[in-house]
Amino acid sequence: MASLIPPVKAAPLKRIGQTLQEPSTKRVKPLSRVTSLASLIPPVKAAPLKRIGQTLQRSISFRSDCRPWGRQIAPAITKRRDSKLWSETFDLGLGHMLSSTEIKRQEAIFELSQGEQDLIEDLKLAKKAYRDPMLKLSIMTEHELNQIFFTLDSLIPLHEDLLSRLREARKPDGLTDHVGHILVDWLPCLETYNSYCSNQVAAKALLDHKKQDHRVHDFLQRCLESPFSRKLDLWSFLDIPRSRLVKYPLLLREMLKHTPNDHPDHQHLDEAMNMIQSIVADINTQTGESECRYYKERLLYLESGQRDLLIDSSRILSCHGELKNNRGAKLHVFLFQDVLVVTRAVTQNEQLCYQLHRQPIPIRDLEWEDLQGGEVRLGGSIRGAFSHSERTKNFFQVVFRSGGQLQMHCFQASDAFNKQQWLNCIRQAKEAVWSAESGAAQTASPGCVISPEEPTYLRCFPPDSSRAPG
């Protein structure tokens, strides 16, 4: 299971999901990979690729000449959220009676509870500080806000329920004996995340588009500079549910790690672990398919001959993102499960679309090569804009031969890491096609959105628990 989120811009390559970390203020330039949740993903090993999650970044340009509200004010002091530990919260007069393993188990349970409380506060803040004021001030229409925030409100009571159960299970001295049965009973509620995560790609695209409106831009900038935001932008708050979803498997793994096999809670925790992995995998799959549909619907064909059944039948968008050709022109490239599509980003009816630049290339017949520095012949008016070394870095080539026709592209990625992600995704896409044709099911490497059977938009941990990130 993987990028809940989100096919994880190639420059980023995006990989829908991302990323087990809570929202960060650090800006990254990813490959668009399709995460994810998956993340909403962000090749999208998704920031290369774009991933839903990191991979949800769009190439829509923002206005930089927006006027700020009112007079200039001094920067506000950022309100930071204190990190609490179980051992620091409760007076452990019985601390000497607990083993180090039991203390770590209690810390993991307490972290689950604290995370629920923080999530609830952030979801309520998103509604109170962003949605309600923008509706009241007519900064966005109710329909637009419903598209962006979608079912966010419905997630609040769901997590309030879990938090209430966890607090009831905690004894006055701070110890929690059993939590597994609570999770086994509650986890099926997470199925409601399906629709929310599947909507993230469209929500992010609309939000990015609306930021070009100076009233929206100014309002969001003012919120970002306010203490309550903790330097997180609106999308960070909207992406918190996905971020939380992919963290549950890690929290459960930590609990299991410190729960002895003969402990009464072990069996329930093991059952809960299997449940959350299944739930995340299902949401991940649906999120990936949703992102794939979203981009297929925004492809523009200059002629009917460009239409390809391989595009129509694709359910997985392995990665996508911005690359440059050897003339410096920006292209947006999509790597679907069976076909590579080269496009140019265009605006049509105030919506970002992707106009096919050349004929789609079947993955089966695609050849690729990593071009080292100095092997690329550059052309176009930008020849003198950069030094020779800068112009010839991070190129790779894809070639398609069909009959007497030859189609060749030299692509330049934003950096060496981005290029390597693209090459890895192309290689694994070809392996997946070969495996499908030979009738053998082959699972893609952890963290990649390649295998149709096991997309990774939201996957945050590899199948082998010993390799889980810390």
Image: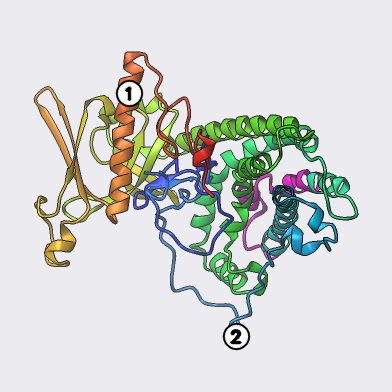
How packed is label 1: few (under 14 Cα within 10 Å), some, or many (20 or more)?
A: many
> Quarter of the image holding residue 437?
top left
Residue occupied by mark 2:
73
| Rendered location of residue 339, percent (x, y) | 31, 30
In magenta stretch: residue 231:
no
Specify whether 25 is left or right of 415.
Answer: right
For marks 1 and 2, give the one nearer the viewer. 1
On the image, the x and y values in percent for residue 240 come to 62, 52
Q: Main secondary structure of the magenta part?
A: helix
What amino acid does circle 2 point to? Ile
Residue at (80% x, 37% y) in the render: 182
Q: Amino acid at mark 1?
A: Val
Label 1 sits on a secondary structure element that is: helix
Q: Which residues are magenta?
A: 135-160
> Residue at horizontal 11%, vertical 28%?
405
Tell me the residue at 59%/78% (across/down).
Answer: 69
Q: Residue furthest front?
A: 96
Quadrant location of residue 194? top right
Task: Examine the rendered structure and indicate whether residue 323 appears above or below residue 293.
Answer: below
Question: Observer-nearest residue: 309 or 393?
Answer: 393
| Residue 422 relative to residue 313: left or right | left
Question: Which of the numbered marks, if any, corresponds to residue 176?
Answer: none
Residue 218 in picture, x, y percent from top left: 56, 71
Of residues 63 and 122, the one nearer the viewer is 122
User: Disc 1 to disc 2, how far (Cα)?
Assistant: 58 Å
- Give the residue number, with chain letter if any, for mark 1: 433
141 and 467: which one is in front? 467
Where residue 25 appears, as percent x and y from the top left, is 53, 64
* Earlier-in-chain disc, 1 versus 2: 2
Quarter of the view holding residue 295: top left
Q: Is residue 155 left or right of residue 38?
A: right
